[in-house]
């Protein structure tokens, strides 16, 4: 068996203090849902710009950089 040191005891007390604790209810689900939906909208807009189904004035999409 290993030696017990003051540092090891301190680190063990700090590291395991929140283990197994879960916030009751929905927690952060509403916030993560909003962030996920915003990311989805952003990606759809990028896809539409790339496919040229969303046209912007003065903005062309091509591989030559023109």
Image (tube, grey):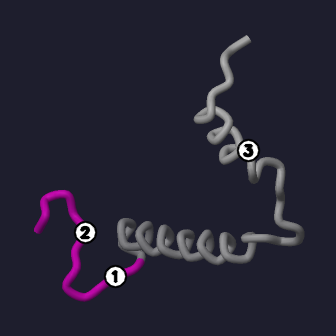
Mark 2 or mark 3: which is in front? 3
**Horizontal and vertical percent position of residue 29:** 75, 70
Please state if 2 lies on the left or on the right of 51 as rendered. right
- On screen, 1 above or below 38? above
Q: Which of 64 and 30 is in front in this view?
A: 30
Q: Quadrant of the C terminus?
A: bottom left
Q: Nearer the viewer, residue 11 or 4?
A: 4
Please name the residue that numbered disc 2 is placed on.
61
Most prominent secondary structure in the magenta stretch? Answer: loop
Magenta-highlighted residues: 54-66
Q: Quadrant of the N terminus?
A: top right
Q: Which of 19 and 59 is in front in this view?
A: 19
Q: Which residue is drawn at 88% across and 71% down?
A: 25
Please name the residue that numbered disc 1 is placed on.
55
Q: Which tag, 3 or 1, sits closer to the chain's start?
A: 3
Q: Badge 1: few (under 14), some or many (20 or more) residues near its Cα, within 10 Å?
A: few
């Amino acid at each position: 068996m290993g030696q017990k040191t003051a540092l090891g005891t301190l680190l063990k007390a700090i590291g395991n203090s929140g283990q197994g604790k879960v916030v009751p209810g929905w927690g952060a689900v509403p916030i993560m849902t909003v962030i996920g939906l915003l990311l989805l909208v952003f990606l759809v807009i990028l896809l539409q710009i790339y496919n040229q189904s969303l046209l912007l004035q003065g903005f062309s999409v091509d591989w030559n950089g023109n």
